[in-house]
Image (cartoon, helix red, strand yellow):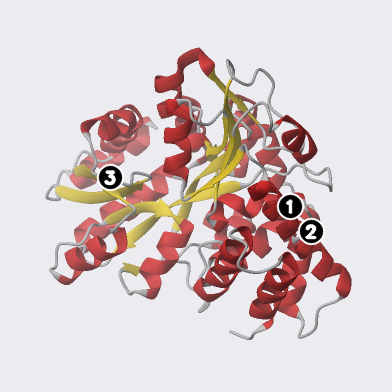
Amino acid sequence: MAGLLSGCSAIDALQPPAVVDIVRTIDNKANITTQDYDQLEDISALVFQQIRDIDPQIHPQLQLSSRTRFIDEIRERTESGFGPDLIITDSETALTLYRSRLIDPIQLSEQDRQDTPQSLLDLVTAKDGALVARPVNQFVQLACFNKERLPTAPRSLEELKQSSSDATFGMAVQLKDLFWSAEAFDASPALKAAMDSPSTVQAHREKVTAWLRWLVDSSYQQNIRFLNNQGNLRDGLIRGELDWITCWSNNLRGLKQKLGDRLGVTALPKGPNQNRTATTRLEVWALGRNSSPLQRRKALLMLDFVTKPWAQKTYSLATNNAMPVSQKAATVVASKIPGGNEALRNYISAERPLSKMRVKARIFRDPVRYDTISDALLDTIYDIQTPEQGAEQILQGLREKR
């Protein structure tokens, strides 16, 4: 490290300073507040300081942005020539930015790819084969609950159904927040088969129908509520309107600040297949299009820095809310991250978990397929169509060639 620092310092002393403009999306449906910055300040300051120890000529400037108008904001800034150098967001947003020609693809060597599971790279690979962003963190989907109102969280969907008369449960209707329930009913193979084959076997149709029927049955239950988004769920839990919600590990700090010792965290309930493989949401870093050659070099240096195994381990342990994408680092920190041990199974080169993750990648990176399933979920949950009709809509939409 000493040699690296001295070598870089000697070289960069001859170069001018470079301000690296960074925009990071957060799950905030309203205006960004100073509290939002405070929640990210500790880890951001640590990362930026260590980057500047290696290259003192880098001057990172972080700006937070709500997801509400994020794509439009990046488009307006890019068209005016003041687009960010780095964008920190989720994989689906990165793919949308790439399709809108608002970010540049990333070139990775085979060596750089080796420590990252291919299934994660698949999530940020466009249909034209371009890698649109680099995976950095994974947030694990969990169940958050109020221990005063619900001393023991349900371990299965059957337990959830039985306990719903005594507690209020909340789920978000967005596909990215409900996909775990499709896997709980082992619907992933059916979705994969629909994308790969022009015909559908009855067993696959029954799997998807069973999943949708559970969602409909849940919507009929008095104390299970489907809300629009994850932010509404968190607000409901904090205000005491909900006792249990699906949540993501990157939101635990904010919930802990509001609920204190009342906050309970556990794995999502098992479904009929009794398998519990953690669902994760990928955080990625993408390259903006307005960078000067110097800013681009510095942005790539920062990106290379935060994906080193030792850096991944350090920052995951500092926050305790994200799993590294580095397989080496993940094995070290898994036991310290909520849901980490279950998420670690996704790194194992077994066909079943990798196959599930690739199904998710194919759906999430294709806006037409994503919208097809999302529309079917809403129409079914809101009783506009039957589960059987919803299943046929999903499978037919996935069968259509892209």
For marks 3 and 1, give the CA distance.
32 Å
- Which circle marks residue 30 in the picture? 3
Residue 248 position within the rendered picture, expressed as x and y whole percent measured from the top left: 52, 39
Q: Quadrant of the C terminus?
A: bottom right
| Residue 104 visible in the current orientation | yes
Compared with 297, 54 (above or below) is: above
| Residues packed near mark 2 inside 10 Å, few (<14), some (14 to 19) or many (20 plus) | some
- Residue at 67 percent across and 64 percent down: it is 359
| Residues packed near mark 3 inside 10 Å, few (<14), some (14 to 19) or many (20 plus) | few
Q: Amino acid at mark 2?
A: Ala
For marks 2 and 1, give the CA distance.
6 Å
Residue 30 position within the rendered picture, expressed as x and y whole percent measured from the top left: 27, 45
Foreground tag (3 vs 1): 1
Report which residue position mark 2 lands on: 210
Report which residue position mark 1 lands on: 214
Compared with 233, 127 (above or below) is: below
Foreground tag (2 vs 3): 2
Q: Nearer the viewer, residue 270 or 40?
A: 270
| Residues packed near mark 1 inside 10 Å, few (<14), some (14 to 19) or many (20 plus) | some
Residue 264 position within the rendered picture, expressed as x and y whole percent measured from the top left: 58, 22
Are the residues flagged by discs 2 and 1 in contact, CB closer than 8 Å? Answer: yes
Q: Amino acid at mark 1?
A: Trp
Compared with 357, 41 (above or below) is: above
